[in-house]
Image (spheres, coloured by chain):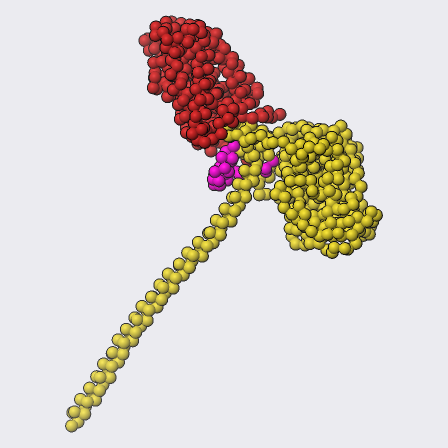
Chain colours: A yellow, B red
Amino acid sequence: MASYAFKGGVHIPNPYPIKKPEVKQVAPPEQAALFLQQRAGGEQKPCVKVGDKVLTGQVIAKTSGKYPSYTHASISGVVLAIEKRPIPHPSGIDGVCIVIDSDGKDKWIEIEKCDQDFLRCAPSKVIQRIREAGIVGMGGAGFPTHAKISNAQGAQTLIVNATECEPGIMCDDALMQHYPREIIRGVEVLMHGCGAKKAIIAIEDDKQEAFNSLLMYNFNAHIEIVQIPTKYTSGAEKILIKTLLDIEIPSGEFASDYGVLCQNVGTVKAIYDAVIDNKPLISRIVTVTGSAVKEPRNYEARLGTSFASVVAQSKPNNKVHQIRMGGMMMGVDVPNIEHSIGKITNCIFVNNATLKPSVQSCIRCGQCNEVCPVGLLPQQLFWYAKSENMDRAMDYNLRDCIECRCCDIVCPSHIPLAQYFSFAKALHCKQTKEQQKADVARERFEFKEFRVERNKAERSEMMARKKEELKKKMAEDKTQKDKIAQAVARVKNKGALKK
Amino acid sequence: MTAVFSSTSQMMRQVIYALVLGISAAYAFFGWGIIVQIFLAVVVAIAVEATFLKIRKHPIKPAIADGSAILTAILLAISIPSIAPWWIVVVGVSFAIIFGKQLYGGLGNNPFNPAMLGYAFLLISYPLPMTTWASEFVNFSQAFDVIFNLNSNMVDALSGATRLDDVKIQLSLGKMMSELNLHSSAQAWINAGFLLGGLYLLARRVIFWHIPAAFLSGIIVTAFLVSLGDGEYLPVQNHLMLGATMLGAFFIATDPVSASTTPKGRLIYGFLIGVLIVIIRTFGGYPDGVAFAVLLMNIVVPLIDYYTQPKVFGK
């Protein structure tokens, strides 16, 4: 058996482990706030008005364009407001939310059933259902799933990312233990949708129960379930592909270019719900954990449920909290708990607020080199990112940084390296754009100069030519005149002779 | 599994702990001198560093607490003769901290190893006291007398030449290697102490294996090649166990700030230091070459690092 090891990465044990990750069902909320900002394709446009009655599963907002996407009502009731509310983003910016006030009935909208077995449907039909169910990458990326599948048509291999490598998150672990049958079925749907002949489900080896339960329900010879070593960044898409298939995909290229489609296991379950159960994406499993909660747990909650209501069930203490959405490595700190669960909310960390250790100087100890899964030299990059020496930073492959924060974790000087790199990338992008603009302006200016010069030259040439012509003409005129004069003289002479 | 150090100071402390064995061996053979020198050096380093940070308007406490100045002081103190007069260590440490570190912008910005810069400065400027080593155990009051110059006859009574220097002089006088009494057991013990400390640092992953391994290979290969030539030369094993070899391999060349940081670069850097050391010891005018070899290689580190970048994922 292959060792499935990869270079770099860090092993961080789950800081708040629980014996058996159960999934606690959360009752549909009194109010649901669904935000419309998407990761790709811009903000959705509401297609309901304040005061409208909506049913569970009804489309309430959508976008068209390159990445069409939909949002569905997660409860039945009345649209209470369409207003700006803070969205889970480090800056605490606001985004448009549709707020639904529950009627307490949770009445579902009639959804047209796919009367055929999905295997008899055309793949395009399956993709359409996935699109209309509003499914996006549920591992945290939030990219519209249908678009990803469409791009990967004809893929050889489907990889189901069930690594859940971010320490602390347990929602996929719980999902696999609770819905193994649905997941295997979902994988089959997805294989049909993209045309892959083979699927690999990858699970980190610290989730033995999840592995066993999937194994028990897998009767498909084309689906392989493998355990890979527990080490953070094992679940980064390109790292996972390298681990499983030994294909290294350079930055700027995509898995689909190599005949691979990678999907998160939570997304696969949502696909099952959409295609087989005819349910759009209106709920998800969320882990609530952190130093400030007494009972870390997974909750299956409707989208739009407030953070506070699920966190309350995990018995938080009364101290000052630091809230983080997503994992402890790649999640984002949010200013407060006034948020609601969205499609990509896989985890809510509730930590006791602590002071961050102060940053010390980089001593080039090289611990960061050892853990970088893409083989960068973070300490060198840091030097150039800090001095904004973009050319050098590019020489040191800034572009390839996946911002996994492994370097941050091991840095003894507590330098927020990934933050510097993310900033440097943005700066480079801006500089490149400015450079392009400047280039265009310069070219335009130079062309204008050239044009003026050219016109001048053409004009003077023309003048010269005209002058020349005039001269010639004058010369011709002169000869003509001479001829006339001669003729006149001749005539005169003749007259004189006659006399 | 990756070692995670909670702070830079913790790493520095590990290095200081690892030095204890070698220092103890030096103490066992040559007495209190080294202890007094270390104490003096640390006090001077803290005072100078604090003063300069104040002049530069930088926070003083965190910089002192990171332990880097203290480590520099200790490394310099154990590199100089244990019976050198007090002003040697004061001048050396001050030079190391001011010109080796603070003028470049403090910790992390110095291209040269500060301790070795201080050492080289002292060796060039004051060759006599820098090559007058204790030849026997020195007790506390003797050490005090000789270092603070309280008894001028004491130096002659306690001193001898540097072992490596002595070997070179004897060889140049036409003696055969076999005729020399190397008296090298003390040096060998001290080197063994630093070797063990170095292995501890490797085990704790404070340093990586590349530099020490390449450094020692460089010495072995070059010493072997040199020994193939005509005439009498120091054998390979003596190169390894005499002078500052082990201190250099595990504590000096591995100073991360001034060393190469790429895996391949570290190998090149370490190996060339080893080569230079043997060349300086054999053909140079100075008794030991660790300081000069390290400083020379410090200069080329940016070049080495640039051309030895590891393969990036997918390229």
**Is A431 above or below relative to A384?**
below
Tell me the quadrant of the picture where the N terminus of chain A can be found.
top right
User: For residue B47, what is the image quadrant?
Assistant: top left
Q: Is B289 a magenta residue?
A: no
Taking the image as shown, residue A421 lies to the left or right of residue A460, namely right
Residue drawn at x 73%, y 47% is: A33
Give the x, y percent position of residue B44: 43, 19
A391 vs A119, nearest the viewer: A391
Q: Position of residue A251 (x, y in %)?
A: 57, 41
Residue B18 position within the rendered picture, expressed as x and y whole percent measured from the top left: 53, 16
Front-lying residue, A452 or B138: B138
At a point 52% along the width and 24% down the height, the residue shown is: B65
Q: What residue is rendered at 25% in x and 78% in y?
A: A478
Is A395 in the magenta? yes
- The magenta span reads A379-404
Task: Determine the image quadrant of residue A351.
Answer: top right
Magenta residues, dominant SS class: helix
